Amino acid sequence: MKKLLLALALASSANVFAADTLHLYNWNNYLSDATAKRFEAACKCKLVQDYYGDNEEMLAKLAAGAKGYDIVVPTGFAVQTLINQKAAAPLDKSKLPNLKNMDPGYLNAFFDKGNQYSVPYAFTTTLLGYNETQLKQAGVLDKANSWALIFDPAVLAKIKGKVTVLDSQRELMAAALMYLGKSANSTNPADWQAARDLILKAKPYWAAFNNQSYIKQLTTGNIWVAFGYSNDMFQAQADAKKAKRPFSIGFSLQKEGNTLSLDNFVVLKDAPRKDLAYQFINFMLDGKNASDLTNEMGSGNPNAAAKPFVKPEIAKVPAIFPGKADVARLQQLQDLNAKQRRDLNRIWSEIKLK
């Protein structure tokens, strides 16, 4: 009888654990395994993650009817989209006591005044990572501080087939616009046409549009230049050092300007487990837990309580924690209206198909 009762108890426990599952739809390389396991131990639940490589991918999947996710981690302009589509749940801040740890400078942003729907999680810059050794040999290392490294055919001719760019219409168009001296948020049709033409001239020299594997490709030396996110470049640099590669990986901001992505936790309106969603967000707002994101993943951190725990050598990297001069050249992407999205989708289709 005791054995039977024990078996029933274990089965019941397993069923409860299976039911207590938080579903997080997140960016790649945006939560360490150690942090995830600590949360699971703290909440006595299971954390399941799905991944996306681009805001548009996430928005499209949700718009197509994907269900079951509790939390998503959109960049500012995508937060606007979720709010406008009434897909985001209003926050009950009484369930987030650790919200007091946030740096006030990252609250009340243009995309969610009063943070009614979103909690800042991390920020990254979108920039160029590169194989310093190979670029020096090719004679173009001096171009690494400029978008010319991926857009100027004269430069690209020396590194043809060794460049990947993000498969992201907003980020790639923004980089092209900034290289042309325009705002990353320009919606002027003439500016978009000029950016399209610039991209099409550079495209034959690129190896691929790549959101998922450019960290590995850069780390192994298969590519020499990657257009991507600062935390990914941090990872590629660390992996190359750990593997004792015969080359060094660098990453830097570009003189023409870069985009800054402030990524946020958003609880979805149809989230099955809002209770676990609040537990997770509050857990991640703890200073020590938040610091893991920077120390292990190389992301910038909007959590003031995390600062004492951030490694000094990481805090000094301008691409992760930009200084005042760099901040002046950083831009956050803003949401587009329906017509602008259609127009940009048309241009993007032309870019991908030609």
Image: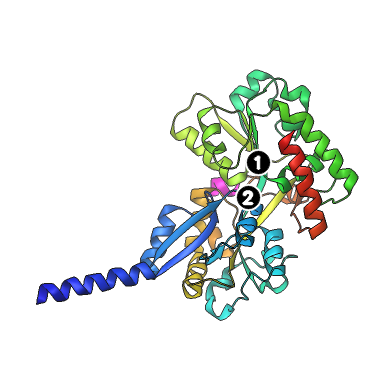
Viewer-nearest residue: 189 or 354: 354
Residue drawn at point x = 39 percent, y = 59 percent: 37
**Callout 1: helix, strand or loop?**
loop
Magenta span:
310-316
Measured as percent of width and height from the top left, residue 335 is found at 76, 59
Viewer-nearest residue: 105 or 218: 218
Q: Assign the N terminus to one quadrant of the image.
A: bottom left
**Callout 2: helix, strand or loop?**
loop
Which residue lies under the disc numbered 2? 54
Which residue lies under the disc numbered 1? 166
Q: Amino acid at mark 2?
A: Asp
Measured as percent of width and height from the top left, residue 102 is found at 60, 67
Q: Residue furthest left?
A: 1
Please tell me in which quadrant of the rendered image residue 336 appears. bottom right
Viewer-nearest residue: 285 or 325: 285
Q: Amino acid at mark 1?
A: Leu
Q: CA distance from mark 1 to mark 2?
A: 9 Å
Is residue 249 a member of the stretch shown in magenta?
Answer: no
Is residue 314 a member of the stretch shown in magenta?
Answer: yes
Q: Nearer the N terminus, badge 1 or badge 2?
A: 2
Measured as percent of width and height from the top left, residue 333 is found at 74, 54
Measured as percent of width and height from the top left, residue 253 is found at 70, 41
Residue drawn at point x = 58 percent, y = 79 percent: 92
